[in-house]
Amino acid sequence: MKIRNADLLFVRSQHHDIDEAITASTGEYVHVAIVIDEKTVIHATSRFGVVTQTLSDFLKTFEHADVYRPTIENLAGVVTRAQQVNQCPYNFSFYPDDPGFYCSQLVVMAFADVLTIEEQPMQFGDGKQEISDFWQDYYAKLDVAVPLNKPGTNPSQLAHLDEFQLVGVL
């Protein structure tokens, strides 16, 4: 399958603890990257922050990705905006005003001039508790409160927007 500039690559759970916590709280996708060109992507990772990476290296880490294509015409500036924050830190807290970016936050920023993506109240439950044990422990280690119901985004939310259509799998 041929990918193109500004396509989004969505990743499903790799069955790590954090992936399982994300899927329990928000849905099937745990990560998203922006295609720069057919050989390069940019995304925000907890390991590197915002990083530009070859598609080959990306797929070594994530194995498969669902490719979603923007349905909007004017994508001017999307990739450039994402590249302007290359090497910024990762936003571990997911708080909207904290420095750095988490993966879907990077997408929202990159598309800001061409698409308004509504933020939603963030959720951290697991179907049994409003805030799962995983997220309680995660935020205790950060020494900050869980940002329950603070505005934010997540990969699954983005994948379900009408402005992005599934076109294939890598």
Image (cartoon, rainbow, N blue to C red):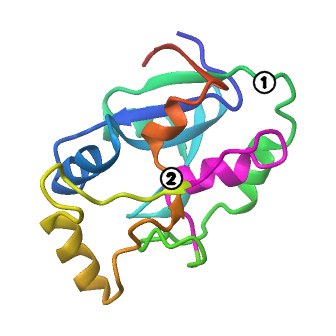
Q: Is residue 65 above or below residue 80?
A: above
| Quarter residue 93 falls in | bottom left
What residue appears at the point 42 percent right and 19 percent down from the top-left corner? 170
**Which residues, given as a range, are shown in magenta?**
100-119
Q: Position of residue 101 (x, y in %)?
A: 56, 64
Q: Is residue 78 above or below residue 148?
A: above
Label located before the other in sequence (1 or 2): 1
Q: Say which of marks 1 and 2 sits in front.
A: 1
Residue reaching furthest bottom?
143
Is 59 situated left or right of 4 in this image?
Answer: left
Looking at the picture, which amino acid does disc 1 mark?
A: Ile
Q: What residue would you read off at disc 1?
A: 72
What residue appears at the point 18 percent right and 52 percent down from the top-left corner? 126
Task: Find out whether residue 102 is within the magenta segment.
Answer: yes
**Considering the numbered disc 2 on the image, is that residue within a helix, a strand or a loop?**
helix
Q: Position of residue 57 (x, y in %)?
A: 42, 39
| Quarter residue 98 falls in | bottom right
Q: Position of residue 15 (x, y in %)?
A: 16, 43
Indicate which disc residue 103 carries. Answer: 2
Kindly report the distance in space between the C-alpha atoms of the residues bearing marks 1 and 2: 21 Å
What residue appears at the point 56 percent right and 23 percent down from the top-left corner? 68
